[in-house]
Image (tube, helix red, strand yellow):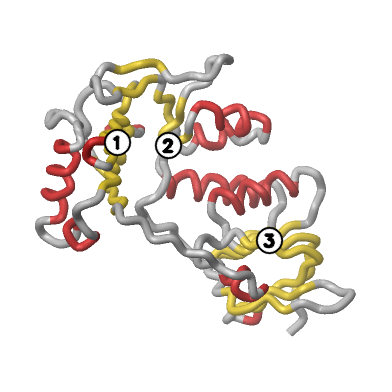
């Protein structure tokens, strides 16, 4: 079966891959994005954007895309003193808080509107080079395979593209555990979140409100492994760790 040919093929349609695809397509580059997920699932990952990154979003003309996906301003953070303090750039930009899955979908929709060939459910199995010619992104379903002069691996920490190219991988295991939960019906003021660092306890805790009363809470600490935050007692252990690290119980 003859593969479709593009100038650039991006393996991975997450935030980075989709943003790159949009930016290239707007300059007239023929781009394909191959994303393995047909529907994005909620996972523990970043849903807070620091103020100094907002000007970059504006330059890329993607800030409105995030806002349309429900991103909200988070102008203040409460630290160890629990007093909200404004966190902003000299130009007045503040942090953004958002749902990762909602932004992923919004960016891929924006990519499609910009002319990108967005291929969902693409199970990439290999990248094959061709001397003097385009490389091929091989997929489990041959009808989804593409050729391109440039292949970009935006497929995360377990990147198949990196493995295919034979690049060495360095793994450093932390003695701390990062855990997170998605929260609903958050009380209080959605205009500020918590970011509490406890050097004495070797960890930190945070709560970032999102739109419609939702939010994300994280802890990063030593002394417990991942198993402690799974199963029937996992959430209670998580809440206890939040409070121990300095988040007020009423939050």
Q: Are marks 2 and 1 in contact (CB under 8 Å)?
A: yes
Mark earlier in primary sequence (3, 1): 3
- Residue under pointer 2: 48
* Local SS, label 3: strand
Q: Which residue is mark 1?
A: 206
Q: Residue at x 61, y 53 (%)?
A: 17
Relative side of 37 to 19, left or right: left
**Nearer to us: label 3 or label 1:** 1
Question: How many marks are shown on the rendered structure?
Answer: 3
Placement of 168 over or under 98, stated as above or below: below
Q: What is the residue that sits farthest to the front in this orientation?
A: 200
CB of mark 3 within 8 Å of CB of mark 2? no
Give the Cα distance between marks 2 and 1: 10 Å
Identify the residue at image location x=53%, y=19%. 89
Q: Position of residue 137 (x, y in %)?
A: 68, 74
Residue that label 3 marks: 152
Q: Quadrant of the C terminus?
A: top left
Q: Judge the density around disc 1: few (<14), some (14-19), many (≥20) Cα neighbours within 10 Å.
A: many
Instruction: Give the farthest residue toward the right.
Output: 132
Residue 70 shows which numbered tag?
Answer: none
Residue 85, compared with residue 45, is above or below; it is above
Residue 98 appears at what percent x and percent y?
42, 37
Q: CA distance from mark 3 to mark 2?
A: 25 Å
Residue 23: percent from the left, percent from the top? 71, 44
Q: Residue at x 43, y 57 (%)?
A: 40
Nearer-N-terminus badge (2/1): 2
Q: Nearer the viewer, residue 90 or 137?
A: 90
In 3D space, how far apart are the residues under numbered discs 3 and 1 (Cα atoms)? 33 Å
């Amino acid at each position: 079966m003859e593969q479709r040919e593009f100038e650039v093929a991006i393996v991975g349609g997450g935030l980075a891959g989709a943003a790159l695809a949009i930016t290239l397509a707007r300059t007239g580059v023929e781009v394909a994005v191959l994303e393995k997920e047909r529907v994005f699932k909620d996972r523990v990952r970043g849903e807070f954007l620091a103020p100094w990154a907002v000007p970059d979003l504006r330059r890329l003309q993607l800030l409105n895309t995030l806002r349309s996906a429900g991103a909200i301003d988070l102008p203040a953070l409460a630290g160890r003193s629990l007093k909200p303090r404004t966190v902003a750039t000299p130009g007045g930009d503040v942090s953004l808080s958002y749902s990762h899955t909602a932004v992923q979908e919004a960016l891929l929709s924006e990519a499609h509107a910009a002319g990108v060939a967005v291929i969902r459910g693409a199970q990439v199995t290999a990248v094959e080079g061709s001397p003097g010619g385009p490389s091929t992104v091989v997929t489990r379903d041959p009808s989804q395979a593409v050729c391109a002069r440039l292949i970009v691996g935006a497929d995360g920490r377990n990147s198949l593209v990196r493995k295919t190219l034979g690049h060495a991988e360095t793994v450093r295991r932390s003695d701390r555990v990062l855990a997170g939960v998605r929260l609903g019906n958050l009380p209080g003021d959605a205009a500020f979140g918590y970011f509490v660092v406890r050097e004495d306890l070797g960890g930190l805790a945070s709560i970032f409100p999102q739109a419609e009363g939702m939010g994300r809470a994280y802890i990063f600490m030593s002394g417990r492994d991942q198993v402690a935050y799974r199963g029937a007692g996992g959430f209670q252990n998580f809440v206890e760790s939040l409070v121990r690290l300095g988040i007020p119980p009423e939050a």
